[in-house]
């Protein structure tokens, strides 16, 4: 299957599941392909035939964007090396959860979250430690008796009851012993933190030297500016006095490529519930599909975030996606 067809299939599946989906980020470089929202759930999705193409720099940027936009970064892919990804298993690459299309379908269409995740050494599941302890005590088994049944140490059983996850084989053996479900699903939309510990959100990269002046002006106006390197926009800017005041920010000469980026920014903004502004040297129009155009000299004359918000609102009113 071509990557374009795969992107189309994943987009159609998310739409069938009730997500509002952005236009494809058909411009390079790109950290994610589409943004998708269903209610409070916001996804930033990278779609790949082979997930080995997902590198550390892209993973770090997706995780930063997830933090700034309150979104879940996610990769949907077909295979790793020459092996297809297993259905109903969550994988991880550079701190980002990875699903096969079948796993995504089951999660978003069928409402059946995955129970298994891949980690060094094999496949694992979440054990409900409290439920396991209750079942053991109902049988009047000691930790040692259960350990003997499983062929593990008493200390290991104690760790299972304290919340340590188990291999698929051990989980199946436990459920067979007690004839009861003892596993809990992987909460992919919360980043699967309970099964995958990652380092803190990676630091922001330095701004492109060509963008430093724009970053300085936005910072002076009261924005926290988070530069990006692999997104359709150059930065995510947060109004420090307004928790809702997130602006996707672009900057370049106003060319056909810039116009294309502005349209993509608009589409992403409708899904992420953010506004967007593109700073240009000269502009012959006030906006592009909801992305406000602001000339560099004009931006420098804006003294605070409230003035910039007013300009964006007046030039680029749009109806936010539900």
Image (cartoon, rainbow, N blue to C red):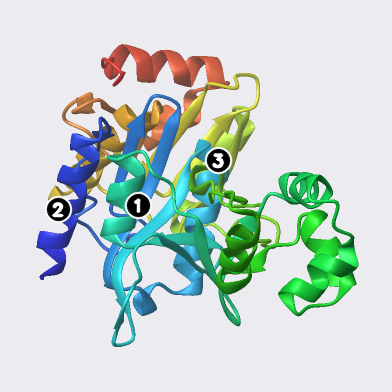
In the picture provided, is 48 more to the left or to the right than 215?
left
At 20% from the left and 36% from the top, the residue drawn is: 15
Q: Which x, y percent locates residue 281? A: 30, 41
Q: Whole-Å distance between the Cαs marked 1 and 2? A: 13 Å
- Apparent side of residue 182 relative to residue 284 in the rendered image (left or right): right
Q: Which residue is mark 1?
A: 45
Tell me if residue 300 comes above or below residue 177 in the rendering: above
Circle 3 crowding by C-alpha within 10 Å: few under 14, some 14–19, many from 20: some
Q: Crowdedness of circle 2 by 10 Å Cα count: few (<14), some, many (20+)?
A: few
Residue 191: image x %, image y %? 55, 49
What crowding class fits label 1: few (fewer than 14 Cα within 10 Å), some (14-19), or many (20 or more)? many
Camera sees residue 277: yes
Circle nearer the N terminus (1, 3)? 1
Give the alpha-carbon distance from disc 1 to disc 3, as whole Å. 15 Å
User: Which badge, 2 or 3, comes first in the chain's sequence?
Assistant: 2
Which of the numbered marks, if any, corresponds to residue 68?
3
Q: Secondary structure at mark 3?
A: helix
27 vs 66, nearest the viewer: 66
**Camera-nearest residue between 203 and 222:** 203
- Above or below residue 315? Residue 82 is below
Regarding mark 2 in the picture, which secondary structure is present there? helix
Image position of 247 (left or right of 101): right
Q: Are marks 2 and 3 in contact (CB under 8 Å)?
A: no
Q: Are marks 1 and 3 in contact (CB under 8 Å)?
A: no
Instruction: Pick the quarter of the image with the N terminus.
Output: bottom left
The image quadrant of residue 295 is top left
Residue assigned mark 2: 9
> From where the camera sits, is residue 280 visible?
no
């Amino acid at each position: 299957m071509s990557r374009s067809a795969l992107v189309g299939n994943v987009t159609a599946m998310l739409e069938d599941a009730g997500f509002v989906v952005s236009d494809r980020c058909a411009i390079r470089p790109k950290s994610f392909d589409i943004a998708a929202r269903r209610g409070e759930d916001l996804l930033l999705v990278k779609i790949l035939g082979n997930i080995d193409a997902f590198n550390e720099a892209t993973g770090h940027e997706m995780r930063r964007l997830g933090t700034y936009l309150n979104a879940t970064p996610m990769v949907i892919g077909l295979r790793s090396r020459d092996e297809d990804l297993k259905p109903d298993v969550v994988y991880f690459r550079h701190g980002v959860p990875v699903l096969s299309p079948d796993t995504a379908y089951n999660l978003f269409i069928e409402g059946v979250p995955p129970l298994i995740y891949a980690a060094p050494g094999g496949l694992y599941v979440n054990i409900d430690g409290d439920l396991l302890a209750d079942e053991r005590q109902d049988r009047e088994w000691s930790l040692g008796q259960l350990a003997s049944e499983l062929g593990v140490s008493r200390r290991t059983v104690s760790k299972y009851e304290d919340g340590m996850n188990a291999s698929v084989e051990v989980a199946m053996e436990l459920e067979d012993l007690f004839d009861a479900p003892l596993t809990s699903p992987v909460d992919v939309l919360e980043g699967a933190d309970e099964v995958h510990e990652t380092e803190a959100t990676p630091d922001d990269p330095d701004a492109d030297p060509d963008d430093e002046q724009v970053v300085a002006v936005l910072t002076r106006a009261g924005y926290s500016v988070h530069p990006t390197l692999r997104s359709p926009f150059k930065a995510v800017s947060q109004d420090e006095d307004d928790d809702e005041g997130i602006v996707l920010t672009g900057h370049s000469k106003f060319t056909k490529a810039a116009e294309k980026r502005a349209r993509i920014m608009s589409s992403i903004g409708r899904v992420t519930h953010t506004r967007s502004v593109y700073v240009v040297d000269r502009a012959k129009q006030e906006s592009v599909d909801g992305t406000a155009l602001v000339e560099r000299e004009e931006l420098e004359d804006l003294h605070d975030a409230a003035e910039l918000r007013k300009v964006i609102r007046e030039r680029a009113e749009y109806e936010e996606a539900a």
